[in-house]
Image (spheres, rainbow, N blue to C red):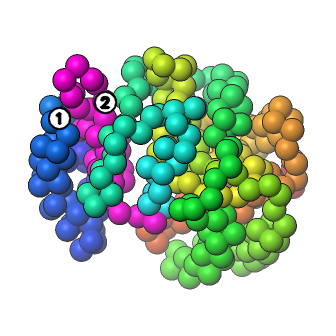
Amino acid sequence: MIPAGLDWLRDSEAGRTWLGSLPATLAACADRWNLDLGAPYDASYVSLVVPVNRAREQIVLKIQYPHRESEHEAAALARWGGNGAIRLIDHDAEANALLVERCDPGTHLSTTAAQVGLGAMIDLLPRLWVAASAPFGSLEDEVARWVHNLPEEWERAGEPFEHLLLSEAIDTLVGLAGSQGEQVLLHQDLHGDNVLRARREPWLAIDPKPLIGEREFGLSPIIRSYEFGHSRDAVVRRLDRLTGELGLDRDRARLWAFGQAVAWGFERGNMLPRHIETARWLLDV
């Protein structure tokens, strides 16, 4: 019943505890919301995501592994109200469980051609950039965590690249965080695998890691992600098209993408080579 994508959680005591609690949590959610459960989706790595039926309603149950970045996912979906993102139907904060709209056929935007994918993102982003405040954390506070943690993560990964690149990323992030423009709600992880084909609209965003910050940062996950092409030219095309059509500051967007690529360039003690390669390209384009 538990998909293989969640196996990495068995490496920690907290993860094993959460996995062990899933059957009881799943049963409790099914009872609370009168759900008929389907088989979990395989392509999920931080939550158990299950298609469910309630009477004639086809929806999705999502039980989240507790994590700071997704703590306010339900609040973000509620704030968007289905405008560019899936609709929130109900939320059980104690169980970290959400009932959300189901996307059919559910094809990932990452499977489309790059120009189509970027066009869809350009349509979605302004609709997601709405005014918001509590309970969401700020981009400035998020940057402070990155800056604090990066030297330790770099050392734990075996100092896999020159210290000068690390220092440049830290200095860049600090400078950007303290000089932001208008603050809006951001989907911090808006890449091609977090946008799905739907019936209500052509494409809908899922899985927000919400933050309050300036719009230029909201381009970072799209610019640095490799599903629409991993090359210097592809990165530049994404940067130029996104900033040009959305009327945003190219240099700030470039530097935010550079900083986030380094900040997200480590996972469980290892460096993610494509993130760091992308960061290098963004330094001089």
Count the numbered circles shown: 2
Number of other residues with Cα within 10 Å of mark 1, as a class: few under 14, some 14 to 19, many 20 or more: many
- Residue 199 drawn at (x, y percent): 46, 17
Residue 190 appears in the figure: yes
- Residue 247 drawn at (x, y percent): 86, 38
- Residue 104 drawn at (x, y percent): 39, 21
**Residue in the image at 47% along x and 34% along y:** 86
Q: Nearer the viewer, residue 11 or 90?
A: 90
Q: Is residue 103 left or right of residue 128?
A: left
**Residue in the image at 23% along x and 63% along y:** 18
Looking at the rendering, the stretch of residues picked out in magenta corresponds to 40-68
Amino acid at pointer 1: Leu
Amino acid at pointer 2: Ile
Q: Which residue is mark 1?
A: 35
Q: Nearer the viewer, residue 203 or 92?
A: 92
Give residue 89's quadrant in the image: top left
Q: Is residue 21 left or right of residue 115?
A: left
**Residue in the image at 51% along x and 79% along y:** 156
Q: Is residue 104 left or right of residue 240?
A: left
Up the image or down, 256 lies above or below 153; here it is above
Q: Is residue 193 magenta?
A: no
Cα separation between marks 2 and 1: 9 Å
Q: Earlier in the sequence, mark 2 or mark 1?
A: 1
Number of other residues with Cα within 10 Å of mark 2, as a class: few under 14, some 14 to 19, many 20 or more: some
Labelled disc at residue 59: 2
**Residue in the image at 12% along x and 43% along y:** 31
Up the image or down, 206 lies above or below 74; here it is above
Is disc 1 placed on a helix, strand or loop? loop
Which quadrant is the N terminus positioned in?
Answer: top left
Up the image or down, 217 lies above or below 225; here it is below
Residue 230 appears in the figure: no
Is disc 2 placed on a helix, strand or loop? strand
